[in-house]
Image (cartoon, rainbow, N blue to C red):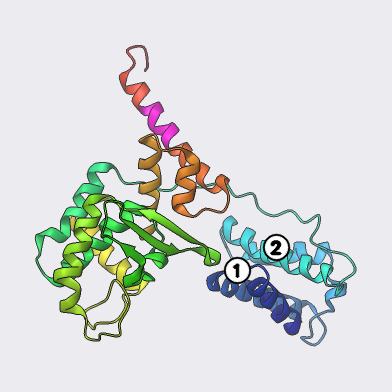
Amino acid sequence: MQQQIEDFLTFMSAEKNAAANTISAYRNDLDQFQQFLGSVGVNGQSPSLRRVDEPMLQDYIGVLRGRDYKDATVARKIAAVKSFFSFLTAEGVVPMDPTEALTTPRVGKTLPKALSVREIDELLEQPRKRSTPEAKRDKAMLELLYATGMRVSELVSLGLDSIELRNNRATVRCVGKGGKERLIPIHEQAVHSLRVYLQDGRPELCRSRGEKGLFINRRGERLTRQGFWLILKNYAKAANIPGEVTPHTLRHSFATHMLRGGAPLRSVQELLGHANISTTQIYTQLTDEHVRRVYDHAHPRAL
């Protein structure tokens, strides 16, 4: 079975252009499924893939539930198995897909958390309380992330040649999931913070002319996702923002505030780099809730 897993992962990477994180998740989920098959086989040997049937798969779901996984985690693991068998069926490795009628846990869409405009303002003001090169870098990063709605992985992957600030139509070019490139406009406040960082911050941090990363740490190396996460966590705490604030929180806030400001859904979809508009539509629920709260508060007949 291990060879079939490797073939499937190669297919997902080469043919479907799946991201490295997606491939890693598939590998972990299918390795766990393989271990399950070994446990129900004879002398620790996994049954032939041709012998896998729906009752066996239902037993696997029972095992996953017995480990107290959340419904979303169980659904993801079963989705990996379904994709695997769909591939095996198409390749003729198995005659029929045993997962075809398999039901998986229904997972409701969780509304993403969005900060208020006041909380965003307070967060973005925190780096200004210091004048270090790191603070100038942090100000530029936070401004850019909220200005564009980029993923944190896209932010830390930016190079010096990813931004265009020399005209009145400043943009950032980032590469998203599946290697898809998009060009995002940048507003003037973010442009100003980037210019300050490039002029007074980055030269102090950079130790090698060969370093092309836009945002670098105090060792002169490209900043990591984990490094940015820690920076954001500290600023959110300093701003007294309740709850957990993650890089995705800023992405959610960007989308929510854009829609509340009247931006078309399709435009927000393009800015976020979502392949399907259904992914972007979850933010409309947030704006609908906001309108409802305003209505209930403002209408004299509303209770």
Residue located 21% across and 54% down the image: 124
Quadrant containing the N terminus is bottom right
Judging by the rendered image, the residue that carries numbered circle 2 is 61
Q: Amino acid at mark 2?
A: Ile
Residue located 83% across and 79% down the image: 47
In percent of width and height, residue 287 lies at 42, 35
Looking at the image, residue 49 sits to the left or right of residue 292; the answer is: right
Judging by the rendered image, the residue that carries numbered circle 1 is 18
Q: Amino acid at mark 1?
A: Ala
Where, by quadrant of the figure, is residue 244 drawn? bottom left
Give, as a single range, the part of the protein colored magenta.
287-293
User: Who is closer to the viewer here, 155 or 245?
Assistant: 155
The Cα atoms of the two marked residues, 1 and 2, are separated by: 25 Å
Where, by quadrant of the figure, is residue 163 drawn? bottom left
In percent of width and height, residue 50 lies at 87, 74
Q: Report the predominant secondary structure element of the magenta stretch.
A: helix
Q: Secondary structure at mark 1?
A: loop
Looking at the image, residue 58 sits to the left or right of residue 146; the answer is: right
Q: Secondary structure at mark 2?
A: helix
**Residue 293 vertical position relative to residue 242 in the rendered view, above or below:** above
Is residue 139 visible in this depiction of the protein? Answer: no
- Residue sitting at the far right: 95
Quadrant containing the C terminus is top left
Is residue 229 visible in this depiction of the protein? Answer: yes
Question: Is residue 291 found inside the magenta-colored segment of the image?
Answer: yes
**Residue 165 vertical position relative to residue 115 in the rendered view, above or below:** below
User: Who is closer to the viewer here, 220 or 284?
Assistant: 220
Does label 1 or label 2 sit earlier along the sequence?
A: 1
